[in-house]
């Protein structure tokens, strides 16, 4: 399961999505998330989902990676679908299934499928940002977008740096956790057997060395930054300057058009 977690990972490439300005990518991903929530029926949701699949095709990201981004949250997705299936009622309609206190209506089935697709493509769309943007470029983009806050003495650079480091360390901590689990299993620890309480207790020998390793890595990172005379964002220059191109404006126009279709569909239907 840990090997299937791809949050925070960057996969280099030369696709049109990789070449886009990272500032535009952040804003457009947010708009795409809004697009998914703005869809109020299956037509609007189908338009948004199809657009996300087209973006994935343009990014040349493997479908296997797209499925990997979903796998860790399958329990949450299933729970969301089941809750909508059981608790969404339909007035003046006969239930399709009636058992004890459980009543399943057609409206509940439709809502369950709708929410299932919305959550899946929400995660898939958000994963695309880190898949196609390196942590350094992502830091520069966040800092650039939040630069107006510098006027009120807000530590924009430091905040952007912390967010990116935290995102970057997710794959590292996952890899470290996997190594610790393999070492514990080699010593005879039963991590995959027993009930829920037993499995929770068996996680203690994993969490303690993981926390120690995390603090050790944080200390090493702080030492490395001090050795390189890092003193925040004041007076710093960047090797790569962010520049908007025609591709970014074309992508923005495409996202706005799709969002307009969804909003128009909500108004008409």
Image: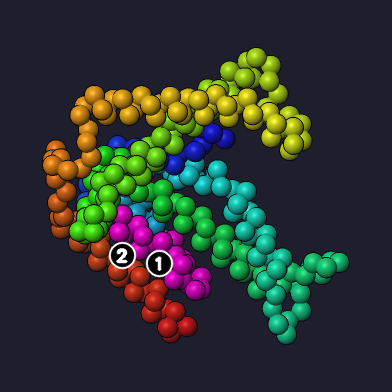
The answer to whether one can see residue 65 in this image is no
In x, y percent, where is residue 225? 27, 29
- Residue occupying image coordinates x 40% and y 66%: 35
192 or 117, which is in the foreground?
Answer: 192
Mark nearer the N terminus (2 vs 1): 1
The magenta segment is 26-49
**Which residue carries the number 2 mark?**
255
CB contact under 8 Å: marks 2 and 1: yes
Which label sits on residue 35? 1
Which label sits on residue 185? none
In x, y percent, where is residue 6? 45, 39
79 or 164, which is in the foreground?
Answer: 164
> Was residue 41 drawn as part of the magenta stretch in this picture?
yes
Q: Is residue 61 left or right of residue 233?
A: right
Q: Does 41 sit above or below residue 6?
A: below
Q: Does 127 sit above or below residue 214?
A: below
Q: Is residue 4 left or right of residue 79?
A: left
Which corner quadrant of the image does residue 51 belong to? bottom left
Q: Secondary structure at mark 2?
A: helix
Circle 2 crowding by C-alpha within 10 Å: few under 14, some 14–19, many from 20: some
Q: Main secondary structure of the magenta part?
A: helix
Q: Residue furthest top?
A: 187
């Amino acid at each position: 399961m840990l090997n299937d977690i791809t949050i925070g990972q960057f996969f280099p490439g030369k696709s049109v999505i990789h070449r886009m300005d990272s500032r535009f990518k952040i804003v457009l991903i947010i708009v795409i998330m809004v697009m998914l929530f703005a869809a109020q029926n299956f037509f609007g949701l189908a338009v948004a989902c199809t657009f996300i699949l087209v973006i994935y095709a343009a990014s040349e990201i493997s479908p296997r990676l797209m499925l990997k981004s979903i796998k860790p949250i399958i329990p949450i997705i299933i729970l969301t679908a089941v809750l909508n299936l059981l608790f969404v009622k339909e007035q003046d309609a006969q239930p399709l299934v009636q058992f004890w206190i459980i009543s399943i209506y057609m409206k509940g089935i439709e809502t369950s499928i709708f929410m299932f697709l919305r959550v899946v493509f929400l995660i898939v769309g958000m994963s695309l940002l880190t898949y196609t943007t390196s942590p350094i470029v992502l830091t520069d983009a966040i800092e650039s977008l939040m630069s107006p806050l510098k006027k009120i003495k807000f530590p924009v650079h430091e905040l952007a740096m912390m967010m990116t480091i935290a995102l970057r360390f997710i794959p590292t901590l996952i890899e470290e956790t996997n190594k610790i689990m393999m070492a514990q299993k080699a010593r005879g620890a039963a991590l995959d057997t027993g009930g829920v309480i037993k499995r929770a207790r068996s996680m203690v020998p994993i969490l303690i060395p993981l926390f120690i390793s995390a603090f050790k890595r944080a200390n090493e990172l702080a030492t490395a930054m001090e050795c390189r005379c890092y003193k925040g964002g004041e007076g710093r220059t960047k090797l790569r300057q962010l520049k908007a191109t025609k591709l970014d404006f074309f992508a923005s126009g495409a996202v706005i058009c799709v969002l307009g279709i969804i909003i128009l569909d909500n108004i008409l239907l």
